Image (cartoon, grey):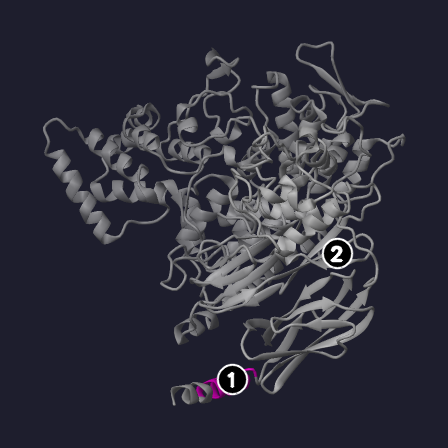
């Protein structure tokens, strides 16, 4: 009886699920496949597609059928097997609905010998045999050394088949090869059980051994592209979906490599992924499932929206839109059901935009004039004024000096000033970013006269120049490719040395003046591949090579590729850096970690910003940084309140609110000088590498921290609050985290306390003018926090000040110092919001 009920229930459940598919479309992925060779297979998945999005994988009650089983067969799991040459259609039925995929089979009768490069190495990689924790370690393991993740197939083949007297393989009886006995644990194996006898991978290795273990050949086809299905999906928590991975080769062949691919998730709390490629959704948000196979990568985007409510709909309906940025940000937020916070007040905006754009606080007069202005366009007019201020030039010159490592640690003082002046004048002139980059990478002449030349004085080696240039102007790190293929990206060691060879004909020699270096291009010279010992054709990343015997200036060739509007990396890198400065987080985070496996949180927005930056639709100047900044600053997205809503409190990347962040070291120090009225003296320089110092009179009293060209200027405050040393091209050099050392510095350090005690400080001025408590509190709040105190704040502070005044040991001056100290060490002052 129970069995009958179960059968009846199953029939009803299947009907219900089939009905659920009504109103949507079924897709069988991949929709078209070509199977190459007698053993070729392709897994198919059936998905439900609705309103332009894949919303689930159908896994139950599916019936697969092949229209011609003489061409290809299909089993109940959707795995298609090549049978004979020809073309057929696979149909997947789900209730009353169905979907189809076209299958073409070629070479079914050909003899198939496994490729060491394209099949054997991927199997070893999939099971971790050539990982850094196993035989891919620098010294190998158990006497066997393989290249990390198979970047050197020739050496790997030699190690497996020739080293140790060839005892690792038995070509007469493949089953007795150590290559099979150890990973199946037929013999003791330090790496444990890795392979099952009779599995597809075991049979592939056995077939290769039976074919006399052929090695890699120059004519081997190469992997050119990796494809993952589905490309994106919108799934609810609790959902599962299988990823199918397909490799495309240089001869046009394709292969299902799902079983050999490696998978990882950028957000496991939203969607994790198993080794098999099965996605499991557990939370709300967005995750990227990264797929890696043989130095090619693909990404599957998984979206899991938050629950929708009527309040969220109302918040979206009332959200302000001021330009295309807002349209794209709100579109992304709507897909995730994350509502935006309202626009911030004028008091919040003026403090925020001054700090983010010019690194200064607005004066009290500037605040009052702005707040009293009734014009609707007053924020845009304020933005335009800020973009023309000298403090704006100081702020961005300092930022680009960080990026370009301007420092007397590696440059003599005159060269530091020349490099800084080149950068500052470029900002002042609003020099287009492509022109700025071109002038640097093609710079020649004296390091004292042509500031950009110092880029090559700082990075003298071709490999070092390649690494610095890729981070500085492309926002990506290729450093690990110096020794092996990139573990997370498609870049190879060959590509690295081809790129480095673009810098091999830069010559440096000493000039006649002290500290002068002359840089010029020379007619010969090569950067030799670390492993091969030969020169690679000089080639920009993913571009056409320049012949080794070409007399064309290699740096000019690089500059033309670098600044080409079609370059997919150059404009994207700088747009992302500028966005991060204003929004607290890059559309790609971190800003110097742009790679396919680290996708942007809003790809449509990033693409739109890049397109407008490179080719403005309004006839503006291409590569205009101020224009880009104006777009961002004038958007409602930038001007949103930093106060979170219950529904967007967890959002730290999609632009639903302004992200609160600590002031940078230099901005905080300058703000202390501005509020207290006491400038910071900069009169000592670090010299050498032993910590010694020397006096300097290069910086007259009143010089702001953001005007310093050199990070070797002594300042314990700047160091404590994260000033970068400008030793490596990496945004990670600047530390923005709060620390115990910073707290101790504010409480007991000399920098702030000396300013408070100074005879020209604000505390002295307020005491001399004999202002009452109300007026003192108002002035301090307006100067430091750019707002008036609330009644509650005013009463609480007045009570504290009266209590201090009653202390016979406290003077009026000391009470005012304490007031200033309390405000200047508060989170509200030290953070931009």
Across and down, in percent, residue 447 comes to 70, 20
> What residue is shown at x 46% (from left), y 87% (from top)?
7
* Quadrant that contains the N terminus: bottom left
Residue 679 vs residue 812: left or right? right
Residue 200 vs residue 823: left or right? right
N-term mark: 2 or 1: 1
Across and down, in percent, residue 40 comes to 73, 61
Depth check, front residue: 307 or 674: 307
Task: Name above or below for residue 147 compared with residue 610.
Answer: above
Q: Nearer the viewer, mark 2 or mark 1?
A: 1
> What residue is shown at x 69% (from left), y 39% (from top)?
169
From the image, give the main secondary structure of the stretch colored magenta: helix
- Highlighted range, magenta: 9-21
Determine whether the residue tagged by mark 2 lies in a helix, strand or loop. strand
Across and down, in percent, residue 792 comes to 21, 52
- Residue 623 in view: no
Total labels: the figure holds 2
Depth check, front residue: 120 or 495: 120
- Residue 577 in view: yes
Task: Name above or below for residue 625 compared with residue 306.
Answer: above
Q: Residues within 10 Å of mark 2 (few under 14, many from 20)?
A: some
Q: Which residue is mark 2?
A: 248
Q: Quadrant of residue 463?
A: top right
Task: Name above or below for residue 606 compared with residue 725.
Answer: below
- 774 within the magenta span: no
Q: Quadrant of residue 83?
A: bottom right
Depth check, front residue: 794 or 669: 669
Q: Which residue is mark 1?
A: 14
Q: Are marks 2 and 1 in contact (CB under 8 Å)?
A: no
Residue 646 vs residue 189: left or right? left
Depth check, front residue: 581 or 264: 264
């Amino acid at each position: 009886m129970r069995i009958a009920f179960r059968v009846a229930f199953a029939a009803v459940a299947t009907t219900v699920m089939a009905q659920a598919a009504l109103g949507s479309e079924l897709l069988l992925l991949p929709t078209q496949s070509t199977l190459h060779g007698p053993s070729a297979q392709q897994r198919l998945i059936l998905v439900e597609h609705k309103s332009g999005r894949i919303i689930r994988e159908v896994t139950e009650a599916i019936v697969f059928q092949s229209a011609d089983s003489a061409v290809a067969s299909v089993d109940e799991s959707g795995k298609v097997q090549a049978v004979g040459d020809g073309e057929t259609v696979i149909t997947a039925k789900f209730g009353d609905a169905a979907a189809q995929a076209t299958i073409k089979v070629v070479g079914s009768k050909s003899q198939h010998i496994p490729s060491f490069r394209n099949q054997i190495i991927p199997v070893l990689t999939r099971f971790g045999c050539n990982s850094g924790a196993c035989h891919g370690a620098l010294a190998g393991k158990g006497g066997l050394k393989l290249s990390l993740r198979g970047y050197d197939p020739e050496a790997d083949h030699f190690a497996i088949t020739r080293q140790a007297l060839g005892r690792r393989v038995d070509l007469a009886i493949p089953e007795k090869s150590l290559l099979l006995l150890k990973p199946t644990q037929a013999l003791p194996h330090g790496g444990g059980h890795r392979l099952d006898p009779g599995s597809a991978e075991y049979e592939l290795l056995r077939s290769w051994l039976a074919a006399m273990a052929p090695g890699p050949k120059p004519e081997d086809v190469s992997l050119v592209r990796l494809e993952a299905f589905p490309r994106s999906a919108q799934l609810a928590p609790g959902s599962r979906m299988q990823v199918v991975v397909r490799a495309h080769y240089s001869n046009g062949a394709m292969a299902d490599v799902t079983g050999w691919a490696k998978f990882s998730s950028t957000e496991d709390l939203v969607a994790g992924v198993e080794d098999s490629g099965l996605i499991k959704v557990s939370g709300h948000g967005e995750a990227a499932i990264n797929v890696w196979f043989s130095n090619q990568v693909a990404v599957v985007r998984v979206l899991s929206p938050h629950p929708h409510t009527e309040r969220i709909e109302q918040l979206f309906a009332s959200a302000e839109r001021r330009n295309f940025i807002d349209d794209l940000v709100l579109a992304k937020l709507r897909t995730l059901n994350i509502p935006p916070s309202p626009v911030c007040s004028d008091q919040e905006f003026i403090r925020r935009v001054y700090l983010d754009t010019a690194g200064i606080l607005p004066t009290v007069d500037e605040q009052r004039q702005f707040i009293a202005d009734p014009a609707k366009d007053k924020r845009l007019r304020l933005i335009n004024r800020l973009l023309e201020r000298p403090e704006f030039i100081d702020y961005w010159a300092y930022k680009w000096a960080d990026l370009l490592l301007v420092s007397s640690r590696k440059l003599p003082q005159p060269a530091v000033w020349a490099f800084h002046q080149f950068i500052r004048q470029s900002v002042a002139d609003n020099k287009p970013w492509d022109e700025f980059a071109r002038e640097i990478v093609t710079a020649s002449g004296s390091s004292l006269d042509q500031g950009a030349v110092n880029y090559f004085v700082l990075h003298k080696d071709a490999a070092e120049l390649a690494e610095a240039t890729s981070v500085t102007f492309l926002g990506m790190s290729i450093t690990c490719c110096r020794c092996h293929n990139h573990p997370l990206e498609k870049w190879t060691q060959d590509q690295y040395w081809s790129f480095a060879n673009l810098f091999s004909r830069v010559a440096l020699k000493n000039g006649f003046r002290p500290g002068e270096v002359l840089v010029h291009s020379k007619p010969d010279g090569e950067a030799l591949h670390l492993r091969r010992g030969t020169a690679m054709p000089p080639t920009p990343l993913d571009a056409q090579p320049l012949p080794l015997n070409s007399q064309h200036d290699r740096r000019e060739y690089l500059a033309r590729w670098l600044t080409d509007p079609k370059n997919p990396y150059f404009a994207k890198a700088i747009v992302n850096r500028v966005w991060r400065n204003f929004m607290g987080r890059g559309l790609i985070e971190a800003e110097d970690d742009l790679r396919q496996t680290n996708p942007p949180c809003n790809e449509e927005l990033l693409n739109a910003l890049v397109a407008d930056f490179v080719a403005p639709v309004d006839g503006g100047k291409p590569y205009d940084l101020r224009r880009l900044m104006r777009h961002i600053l004038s958007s409602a997205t930038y001007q949103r309140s930093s106060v979170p809503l219950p529904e967007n409190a967890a959002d730290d990347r999609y632009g639903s609110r302004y992200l609160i962040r600590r002031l940078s070291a230099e901005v905080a120090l300058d703000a202390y000088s501005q509020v207290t009225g006491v400038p910071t003296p900069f009169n000592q320089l670090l010299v050498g590498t032993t910590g010694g110092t020397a006096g300097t009179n290069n910086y007259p009293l009143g010089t702001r921290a953001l005007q310093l060209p050199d990070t070797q200027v002594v300042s314990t405050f700047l160091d404590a609050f994260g000033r970068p040393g400008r030793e490596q091209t990496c945004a990670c050099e600047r530390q923005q985290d709060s620390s115990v050392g910073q707290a101790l510095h504010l409480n007991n350090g000399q920098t702030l306390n000396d300013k408070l005690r100074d005879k020209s400080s604000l505390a002295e001025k307020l005491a001399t003018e004999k202002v009452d408590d109300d007026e003192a509190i108002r002035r301090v709040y307006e100067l430091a926090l750019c707002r008036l105190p609330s009644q509650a704040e005013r009463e609480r502070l007045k009570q504290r000040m009266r209590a201090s005044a009653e202390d016979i040991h406290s003077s009026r001056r000391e009470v005012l110092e304490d007031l200033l100290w309390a405000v200047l060490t508060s989170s509200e002052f030290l953070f931009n919001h």
